[in-house]
Image (spheres, grey):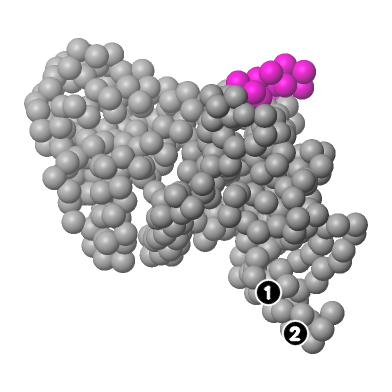
Amino acid sequence: MTGSQWLRALLVVGLIILLTAKAGIWALVVLAGLLVSITLHELGHYLAAKRSGMLVTEFFLGFGPRIWSFRRGETEYGLKLIPAGAYVRIIGMNNLEEVAPEDEARTYRQAKFPARFLTVVAGVTMNALIAVVLIWVLLAVVGVTGGRVLPGPPQFRGDIEEVLKDSPAARAGLTAGDRIQSIDGVTITDFDQLRSTVGPRMGETVPVVLVRNGETSVVRVTPGRYVLPDGATGCGLGITAGTVPRPTERVNPIVAVPKSFVELGRFTGLTVQGLGRFFSPSGLADYGDQVVNASGEQEASPACTPTPATRPAGSGGGGGSGGEAPNRLLSLVGLFQIGTDAPTVELLLFLFATLNITLAVINLIPLLPFDGGHIAVAVYERIQERRKRMQGRYFADVAKLLPLTYAVVLILFLLMISSIYLDIASPITE
């Protein structure tokens, strides 16, 4: 290596040592898991392209200035300065790229549709396989609560453990030890049901049937805002209540195989729903408010939507610790914060299963530069070839998509910067 490459290598080693000194050895585990997930995604593209006879000229770990590389056959392999992922370069990915005439036959754009489709989709397939393996390990080796990686909503035990000061429950006379049986005629069995029952009734006075000292009574409560012990604003009844504990179970390794794919489907569905909520007008407005108010005191919004408590210490009426996942994206900073704060094997496996599923779902968005954008172009080209009964290849004019692609890249950049800022100024707590 040259002197500058040695300097870059020492810089990377120094950053890793600094990271480890600050966050412990788990920082290396989180970094390794991230790099492995992204690298295997690119390896999927690489293997599919090689098998299809496409010319792959580069396979690098990291981005930015080159630290070290070697050439084997027609592909150069190596490391680059910024350890934030990996990339594979397949020549002729679109009609704009100039390629030497002798290499044109081996470009991506000249390959048949099945080869192009499989090459692009191989990355997300690899992420899905990683997630399935991690889920299987959780189910069959580590063990998970209730034998499910994504357990259902916690069962509501009903006994109030604490009534928060000046909360709607306190104003209505509820006390610790009361057992809630129903709210507005709805029998409460779990926290999701508690949220869905209380949520639409914010500001309305509703009957709550409870048992106190063996006697049943009806108390009228008006769900609304209250102040949590940490100074934040909560919404709902303002109580903390326990849950019925679920035992940790291990699933038979053979049974865990199909169950892993079922859990993958549930994971994926929830991820799609979460991204849909985030990119909705209300979700983006909420995210913008979080960014604006991250470093200061957050102003109360007009709407008051309770969140489900999922831990014994959570607020049974919604709000408080242990609520649903916040409406925001997790940056690399946030990933390290969660992975190194109170790490366990179960947490890290769950974290990286979620990461790989999220990478797969996001990459399937049918816009360039995502893999889904390349899939959409390949499908469009195939339709045109069939429609025009062409014997050769039809090339979509990617130049027409460049303005949209630039807009997508700009949005991704803004989301990356804002999510990093949020994870520093207002970190997600476990």
Q: Amino acid at mark 2?
A: Ser
Nearest the viewer among 412 and 336 is 412
Q: Please tell me whether the stretch drawn in magenta is mainly helix, strand or loop.
A: helix
Q: Amino acid at mark 1?
A: Pro
Does the magenta segment cover residue 249?
yes
* C-alpha span from label 2 to label 1: 10 Å
Check contact, mark 2 vs mark 1: CB within 8 A. yes
Q: Mark 1 highlights which residue?
A: 65
* Image location (x, y in percent) of residue 375: 57, 37
In the drawing, what numbered circle is on residue 166?
none
Q: Secondary structure at mark 1?
A: strand
* Image location (x, y in percent) of residue 95: 59, 50
Density class for disc 2 (Cα within 10 Å; few <14, some 14-19, many ≥20) is few
Please give the range of residues in magenta: 247-263
Looking at the image, tell me whether mark 2 or mark 1 is earlier in sequence order: 2
283 with respect to 143 (left or right): left
- Name above or below for residue 160 compared with residue 232: above
Q: Please say whether residue 415 is visible from this viewpoint.
A: no
- Among all residues in the image, which is located at the extreme bottom? 3
Query: Which residue is pictured at 48% across the width and 35% down the height?
Result: 271
Query: Which residue is pictured at 31% across the width and 36% down the height?
Result: 307
* Image location (x, y in percent) of residue 368: 51, 47
Q: Quadrant of the N terminus?
A: bottom right
* Image location (x, y in percent) of residue 84: 63, 61
Q: Mark 2 highlights which residue?
A: 4
